[in-house]
């Protein structure tokens, strides 16, 4: 009986969950680097220009900027990066990246902190992505945000409600 209750609760907890996925391609730049005297740590400004598609009708571009404190080229001690994006319908969002710990693992998390139009539905959404760094600053970044089915429905119906 306990097993049945646990399975039932797991089923109920997942019944309203969905994923908002984002595929990003871009080019980043790490500049104005300050090297620490220990020769291991450094701090610099990261900027990037990107394009994105989603699993909804939304697609567009973003720009990002912020500071990164690194150790040993792979460990990020501290990060604060803000990205502003605009979708093809002219609506905008701002997201905050603060949680990369191991640059070599290629995992990053962020949250949406501001949005207009359909992006308002994602404010507060926690997202996790995996990135692949390539030559000359290019990268790919695939993201999943856990949201409700209702959120995806509202985003997809937003364009219909404007007509």
Image (cartoon, rainbow, N blue to C red):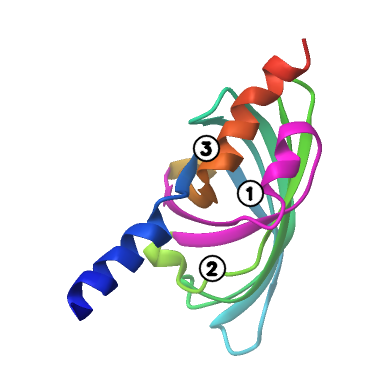
> Left of 52 or right of it: where is 66?
right
Disc 3 or 2, which lies upstream in sequence?
3
Secondary element at tag 1: strand
Residue at (62, 55) in percent of width and height: 125
- Mark 3 to mark 1: distance in Å? 16 Å
Query: Which quadrant does the N terminus fall into?
Result: bottom left
| In the image, residue 39 above or below residue 76 | below
Residue 42 picture quarter: bottom right
Instruction: Name the dominant secondary structure of the magenta segment.
Output: strand
Residue at which label 2 appears: 100
Identity of the residue furthest to the top in this view: 163
Does any portion of residue 48 appear in the rendered image? Answer: yes
- Indicate the position of residue 112 as horizontal and vertical percent values: 69, 52
Which residues make up the magenta segment? 107-134
Residue at (52, 37) in percent of width and height: 24
Pointer 1 local density, CA inside 10 Å: few below 14, some 14–19, many at least 20: some
Q: Nearer the viewer, residue 62 or 16?
A: 16
Query: Which quadrant does the C terminus fall into?
Result: top right
- Mark 3 to mark 2: distance in Å? 17 Å
Residue at which label 3 appears: 24
Does any portion of residue 142 appear in the rendered image? Answer: no
Pointer 2 local density, CA inside 10 Å: few below 14, some 14–19, many at least 20: many
Residue at (56, 83) in percent of width and height: 39
| In the image, residue 99 above or below residue 30 | below
Pointer 3 local density, CA inside 10 Å: few below 14, some 14–19, many at least 20: many
- Indicate the position of residue 159 as horizontal and vertical percent values: 69, 19
- Indicate the position of residue 22 as horizontal and vertical percent values: 51, 39
- Indicate the position of residue 91 as horizontal and vertical percent values: 78, 29
Residue 58 picture quarter: top right
- Given contact means CB atoms under 8 Å apart, are the residues at marks 3 and 1 in contact? no
């Amino acid at each position: 009986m306990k097993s049945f209750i646990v399975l039932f609760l797991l089923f109920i907890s997942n019944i309203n969950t969905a994923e908002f996925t984002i595929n990003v391609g871009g080019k980043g730049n790490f500049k104005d680097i300050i090297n620490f005297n220990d020769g291991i740590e450094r701090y610099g400004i990261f900027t990037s220009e990107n394009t994105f598609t989603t699993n909804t009708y939304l697609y567009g571009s973003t720009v990002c900027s912020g500071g990164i404190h690194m150790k040993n080229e792979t460990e990020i001690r501290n990060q604060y990066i803000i990205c502003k994006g605009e979708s093809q319908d002219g609506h905008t969002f701002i997201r905050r990246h603060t949680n990369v710990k191991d640059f070599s693992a290629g995992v990053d998390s962020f949250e949406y902190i501001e949005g207009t139009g359909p992006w308002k539905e994602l404010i507060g959404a926690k997202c996790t992505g995996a990135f692949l760094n390539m030559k000359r600053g290019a990268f790919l970044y695939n993201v999943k945000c856990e949201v409700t089915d209702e959120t995806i429905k509202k985003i997809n119906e937003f364009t219909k409600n404007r007509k």
